[in-house]
């Protein structure tokens, strides 16, 4: 029923986020959400056909809808966009959480064989079907919490076979789950045991990236560029190579230390730089000048028991478009809820609630190159909004 029409009317508070066709919000604009009282939305098939006040609804739309939903007393928001997650993985690391609660650090756990490598063994050992089931469970929960678009990364395989298995699981879920799933190749997440750094990077460059690009298994290529992870030079090799194969760069950087990842993001034309808890003021200007979205992941700070949040207020003052995401993963953040992430951003990073909503809708879509399709309630966009009580 591609032309089926649905009318949402008498919406007490219709939060469109924007009606002007802008692709992202920054500075003062993050507090302007285009809220319409007594609003109405008409969807036709998969697209939004009309947005405005219920009193101004054209008669043919009011009387001709196949289904009408009375939204009196309700707020309607765009579907939330989670633009940074690692939602496909094998195994569980809840034991590490208990260890951290008793004082063991994330680095100590990783050095003892836990962390990313623990997820690697569990993911290598899981079947395709098992990973689809686990991924579907996470997406179901996210959808219940209002998230309709989810980016997911590989990076727990660290060999060609398992990286491809993870990306294929995401493709299966994209085709069979109502959530929109966007895939990112993160082969350069860690170096697996038993091979040298240079050997592993050669595999990423010469085998994984060409195969992932040829099979169209991912839209983005990401790298963990930080102290204790990959260096700027190593990350440059990976991201510039990926760009040549048509994968858009993203970068995990400045989570623990500022080692030059923001400069590299500019150099390789990254669409976003993610984490940024340790960013330097000059790098905020740099990202802002090059229109690179800062994706902030405060759930990690909470989950790891840390205290230094990314300087979100300064970023907004310096007109950097910022997005918020869960970074949902088995080790450093087990939070699937963007509403909780928004609450953390408000209470711990001093975001205005409207800014937090902009950061989880239009700006998160911008970080995925999708803000012309999702992230606001505008005519012609995809109709996947979530109704919130
Ligand atoms: Zn991450």
Image: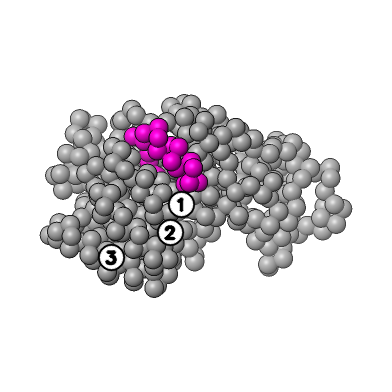
Q: Which residue is mark 2?
A: 248
The residue at the point 28 percent across, 65 percent down is 205
Q: Residues within 10 Å of mark 3 (few under 14, many from 20)?
A: some
Quadrant in which residue 198 is drawn: bottom left
Distance from disc 3 to disc 2, alpha carbons, whole Å, reads 15 Å
Q: Residue at x 28, y 37 (%)?
A: 257
- The segment highlighted magenta reads 274-294
Q: Secondary structure at mark 3?
A: helix
C-alpha distance separating marks 1 and 2: 7 Å
Which quadrant holds the C terminus?
top right
Could you say which disc has been placed on residue 205 in the image?
Answer: 3
Residue 5: x %, y % from top left: 73, 59
Q: Residue 283 colored magenta?
A: yes
Which one is earlier in the sequence, the residue at label 3 or at label 2? 3
Residue lying at the far right in this picture: please name it.
59
Is any part of residue 210 visible from this angle? Answer: yes
Q: Are marks 1 and 2 in contact (CB under 8 Å)?
A: yes
Tell me whether circle 3 and circle 2 mark residues in contact (CB < 8 Å): no
Q: Earlier in the sequence, mark 1 or mark 2?
A: 2
- Seen at 34% across and 70% down, the residue is 210
């Amino acid at each position: 029923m591609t032309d089926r029409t649905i009318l949402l009317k008498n919406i007490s508070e219709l939060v469109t986020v924007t009606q002007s066709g802008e692709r992202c919000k920054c500075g003062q604009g993050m507090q302007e959400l285009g809220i319409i009282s007594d609003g109405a939305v008409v969807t036709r098939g998969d697209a939004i056909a009309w947005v405005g006040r219920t009193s101004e609804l054209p008669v043919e739309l009011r009387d001709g809808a196949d289904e009408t939903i009375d939204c009196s007393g309700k707020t309607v928001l765009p579907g939330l966009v989670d633009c940074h997650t690692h939602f496909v993985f094998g195994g569980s690391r809840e034991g590490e959480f208990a260890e951290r609660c008793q004082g063991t650090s994330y680095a100590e756990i990783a050095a003892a064989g836990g962390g990313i490598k623990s997820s690697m063994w569990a993911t290598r050992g899981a079947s395709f079907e098992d990973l689809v089931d686990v991924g579907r469970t996470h997406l179901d929960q996210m959808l219940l919490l209002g998230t309709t678009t989810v980016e997911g990364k590989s990076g727990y395989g660290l060999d060609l076979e398992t990286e491809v298995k993870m990306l294929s699981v995401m493709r299966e879920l994209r085709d069979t789950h109502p959530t929109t799933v966007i895939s990112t190749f993160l082969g350069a997440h860690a170096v697996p045991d038993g091979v040298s750094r240079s050997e592993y990077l050669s595999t990423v460059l010469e085998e994984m990236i060409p195969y992932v690009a040829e099979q169209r298994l991912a839209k983005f290529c990401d790298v963990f560029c930080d102290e204790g992870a990959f260096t700027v030079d190593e990350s440059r090799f990976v991201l510039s190579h990926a760009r040549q194969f048509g994968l858009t760069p993203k970068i995990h950087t400045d989570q623990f230390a500022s080692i030059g990842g923001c400069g590299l993001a500019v150099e390789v034309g990254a669409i976003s730089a993610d984490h940024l808890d340790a960013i330097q003021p000059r790098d905020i200007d740099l990202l802002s000048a090059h229109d690179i979205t800062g994706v902030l992941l405060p759930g990690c700070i909470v989950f790891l028991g840390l205290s230094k949040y990314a300087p979100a207020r300064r970023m907004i003052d310096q007109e950097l478009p910022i997005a918020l995401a869960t970074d949902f993963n088995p080790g450093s953040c087990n939070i699937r809820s963007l509403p909780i992430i928004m609450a953390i951003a408000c209470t711990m990073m001093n975001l205005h609630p409207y800014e937090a909503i902009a950061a989880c809708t239009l700006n998160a879509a911008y970080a995925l190159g999708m803000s012309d399709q999702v992230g606001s309630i505008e005519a012609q966009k995809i109709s996947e909004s979530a109704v919130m009580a």
